[in-house]
Amino acid sequence: MEKPCIACKVVCALLVIGALNWGLMAFHHNVISHFLGDMTHATRGVYILIGLAGLMGLIKFFKGCPGCKKC
């Protein structure tokens, strides 16, 4: 197996951040809102990026990497 491309690394990092944030939501603690403010433009931007990373992860699960088509 080849090394993951930069796109895969970014997607993985965003998915981990999103998953950890959702896990902490069970304890009523939103890390993203804590650092960026409650529903500011920056917070919404991070949520959009995490959502896009989720879509790319789903595509990668079925068809392979959409960025480089190798990993």
Image: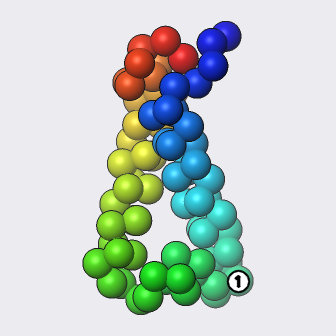
Q: Which residue occupies 44% across, 88% down?
A: 37
* Residues packed near mark 1 inside 10 Å, few (<14), some (14 to 19) or many (20 plus): few
Residue 41 image-quadrant placement: bottom left
The residue at 49%/12% (across/down) is: 70
Residue in the foreground of this view, choosing between 34 and 21: 34
- Residue 19, x across and y down, in percent: 61, 59
Q: Amino acid at mark 1?
A: Phe
Q: Is residue 10 above or below residue 28?
A: above
Q: Is residue 14 visible?
A: yes
Camera sees residue 58: no
| x and y, in percent, of residue 15 in the image | 55, 50
Q: Residue furthest left?
A: 41
With respect to residue 44, does 68 lie above or below? Answer: above
* Quadrant of the image containing the N terminus: top right
Q: Which residue is mark 1?
A: 27
Q: Position of residue 28 (x, y in %)?
A: 64, 87
Kind of element beneath mark 1: loop
| Residue 6 falls left or right of residue 20 | left
Q: Residue at x 36, y 84 (%)?
A: 39
In the foreground, 56 or 5: 5
Q: Is residue 51 above or below residue 67?
A: below
Quadrant containing the C terminus is top right
* Residue at image point 50% right, 43% down: 10
